[in-house]
Image (cartoon, coloured by chain):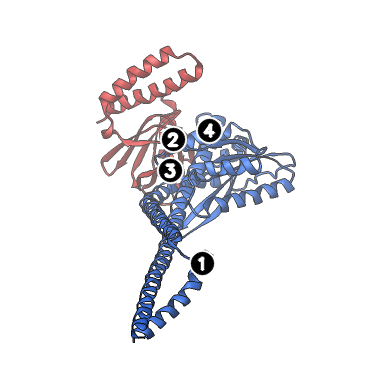
Amino acid sequence: MLVSALKTGVQAAKNAAPVAASSVGQVRGKATQRETKTRIEACHSVYKITKAMQSIANAKLNPAIARMQESRPMAASVRAFIDTACSEVQVPELEAGASCLVIPITSDKGLCGALNTKILFKTMNTIQDLKEKKMKIKVITVGEKGHKNFQSMNPKMLVHTASHFGKTDINFLQASRVAEFVTQTPFDQATILYNKYINRVSFTQMAHTIPALTFFSEQVSKFGEKFEFEGDEEQILKDLAEFQFAVQLYGALLENGASEQSSRLAAMDNASKNAASMALELTQLFNRTRQMQITAEMIEISTGAECCKAKKEE
Amino acid sequence: MSFLRPFSRTFLRAAEEASSATSGGKKRLSLNFYTPNSTPAQKEVDMVIVPGAAGSFGVLVGHVPVVSQLKPGVVEIHDGGKVEQFFVSSGFAFVSTTAADICAVEAAPVSDLDSDTIKENISTFTKTVADAQNDMDKATAQVGLDVNQAMLQAITGAK
């Protein structure tokens, strides 16, 4: 009974051994067990970190969505006014050599899934299209990740970067400052690229094209057809152009912010699950190996005992 | 009397328009009062007084379509005998015959303004304007001074 049980044990050890050996590439001894232990602990700490980041992203997501939604009525109102006033105005086609400003909005911090990759990919496509139309392209990145990407891929196009503006939530003041900073570079057309928030699990890339700031002042007569100006028309339209740019940029920043939190939430959730399952696999491997070692020692002992017993009986 | 002209001209025009059919039969003005982070008011009202950069003007339903910048001042909402006062820092107002859209950068109920802080700010900014080394700093400080003086006026003039 004992022998047959041991035979089964040896068989099991033999079965386990190839698995263990192949996964490590060597006979599993105490050293590799220590290594496995280290790996398990590493998985646990990764799990703790990613779980914490997931909860933070979860906590930040709802306020980010709320801020995004609260900003929409004013943005819609400004846009509606401009649409009403300029309803028959065609934005003039750009001629070759016009200066185009491309503004991708990215995050400062990483570990947020495919958020930045997707928007930078769309940015490259947009730049390619503009290049084919022979436009002069300047890039102003918002966010550290975009800055790093362009510095390594396309440093000549990168004109400025706006990043790390505040640990607190983005507010309109900051967006205005960024808008002011951006508009110091004159442009015939600006394209803001950002991730538009759809729901907790998805977002999509958007590109908003904004005509040159002088476009509004040039449309004085069009505006004048439908509206009267309280005050100096040129001044009002000039200020309105800057204001609507800031409003659009603010909207884009908030949308991207909400998308960033939802993307990080999903990414950290996946990372936690992976860390947990890897820890489980490694723990099982560790335990199997430990049991195998015990079994092997038991076999040695009992084999030795059997030998001594057999010798005695002779 | 030029400072009265914008107000009286607009007021008369508004009265004229109200009596004509351009209001489309609507009796009340749709007010959409927005800031970048909130919606202080979105409802039908009787009248709203807007602190335009060229002078305050009142808006009734049927008003001629107007676009105006806002100066630091008070938006007064008149609704069935009740008056709500909000201080706005700046922004734009888009008025059509049926609606008034006020897009203010910052808005706060006048009752939330603290007169002690404002008085402190006024003295600080007055000093900064006087000590300013260049035009940019002077202009920035002047803006601060104007806004705080307008806030003080809003409190002391409040009913």
Q: Is residue B13 at all visible to an observer of this figure? A: no
**What colour has chain A?**
blue
User: Same chain, marks 1 and 4?
Assistant: yes
Q: Which chain does tag 2 point to?
A: A
Task: Give the label on residue A173, or none.
Answer: 2
Pair 4/3: label in front: 4
Measured in 3D between alpha carbons, the distance from the residue under mark 1 to the one under mark 3, in whole angstroms, is 68 Å
Is there CB contact under 8 Å for labels 4 and 2? no
**Between tags 1 and 3, which lies in front?**
1
Q: Are marks 1 and 3 in contact (CB under 8 Å)?
A: no
Q: Which residue is mark 4?
A: A180
Residue at the (46%, 60%) spot, across then down? A32
Q: Mark 4 or mark 2: which comes first in sequence? A: 2
Q: Which mark is residue B101?
A: 3
The disc, 2 or 1, on the residue closer to the chain's N-terminal end is 1
Q: Position of residue A203 (x, y in %)?
A: 50, 57
Q: Is residue A124 visible?
A: yes
Marks 1 and 3: same chain? no
Q: Secondary structure at mark 2?
A: helix
Disc assigned to residue A23: 1
The chain letter of the red chain reads B
Crowd class of label 2 (few under 14; some 14 to 19; many from 20; radius 10 Å): some
